Image: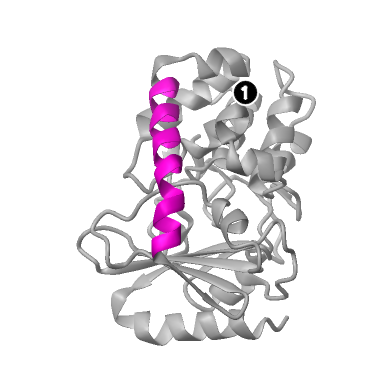
Amino acid sequence: MRIVTRPDFDGVVCAVLIADALAIRQPIYWIEPNEFIKGLAEIRPGDVVANLPFDPRCDIWFDHHSTNRIDKPFKGLFRIAPSAARNVFEYFHTRFKRDYSELVDWADRIDSAQFTPEEVLHPERYDYVLLSMTISSENGPEEDYWNKLVSLLSERDIQQVMADPDVETHCRRVNRENSEYADWLKQCTRIEGQVAITDFRHLDHPPSGNRFLAYCLFPETVVSVRIRYEDRKRQTVVVNIGHSIFNPHCHVHVGKMLAGFEGGGHRGAASARFDVKKMNDYLPEIISRLVRNEG
């Protein structure tokens, strides 16, 4: 029995909860949703899949993304919720050896982007917010670090987790990236209607940083789009879209929209990865729909 999940804060918390409830000690299988959707996941009987689409080969499934809803019976829990971790927490609530209430509350806040402007502008002052920003595959896979976080969060309180040398190193990197990211956003963002479009395709090394910062820098916009190549080979385009959390007037369900462009996600946040040959067809249509802002 393995845990299969994605490398983000919600996925890490799902792994913490499932590992505790089911006493799973096998290495976690980390995979991006786009790879999962394209059938590249090697799911085995007995696997517990969380925060990803359903796969009939798994034994238990947990998710909360509206675009992943299914109509067939399964073991586990699907429900629209602030985080997939919340569904895991409720399903196994009598089986945990520790109290994970605070951790799951933060998973809810972080995955549903329930932030204040202060938390967006100064994540270094908020342990859970900063920690969540260290979990990403944009700088390449870091399975050892993600697995370590699962272990740390299973055994220690947040202050002890943040004091771990590996965590401190990742947090320093994130703070440095965030301090530079505002300048990159100002240089590479154009506004169409009420859409902030950040295009990093001309950069060999697209910058990483606080994905909510655009909502503070461009407060007149209701949705942001970030476009980049997946790697230096420039064969795959990555598009991330998010409703502004401070100007909530985008009417487009971006998860459903991107489901038509090889992606998916929530109403207010979604992503897609597709072959560069489809770029000139996909991108204008995606941006046009957002500019029209029709539900």
Bin the neighbour count of mark 1 within 10 Å (Cα to Cα): few under 14, some 14-19, many 20 and up.
Answer: some
Mark 1 lies on a secondary structure that is helix
The image position of residue 286, as x and y in percent, is 52, 80
Would residue 93 be visible to someone looking at this image? Answer: yes
Q: Amino acid at mark 1?
A: Asp
- State the residue at coordinates (61%, 43%): 120
Q: Nearer the viewer, residue 132 or 38?
A: 132
- State the residue at coordinates (38%, 24%): 169
- Looking at the rendering, the stretch of residues picked out in magenta corresponds to 167-187
The image position of residue 241, as x and y in percent, is 55, 65
User: Does 268 sit left or right of 271 as displayed?
Assistant: right
As displayed, is residue 263 above or below residue 51? below
Residue under label 1, please give it.
Answer: 20
User: Does 92 sit left or right of 67 as displayed?
Assistant: right
User: Does 219 sit left or right of 151 as displayed?
Assistant: right
Number of numbered discs visible in the structure rendering: 1
**Where, by quadrant of the figure, is residue 198 drawn?**
bottom left
**Where, by quadrant of the figure, is residue 159 drawn?**
top right
The image position of residue 83, as x and y in percent, is 69, 46
Q: Is residue 174 magenta?
A: yes
The image position of residue 53, as x and y in percent, is 57, 58
Q: Nearer the viewer, residue 167 or 272?
A: 167
- State the residue at coordinates (67%, 63%): 268
- State the residue at coordinates (31%, 44%): 140
Would residue 27 be visible to someone looking at this image? Answer: no
| Dominant secondary structure, magenta | helix
Q: Is residue 249 magenta?
A: no
User: Does 28 sit left or right of 21 as displayed?
Assistant: left
As displayed, is residue 71 above or below residue 10? below
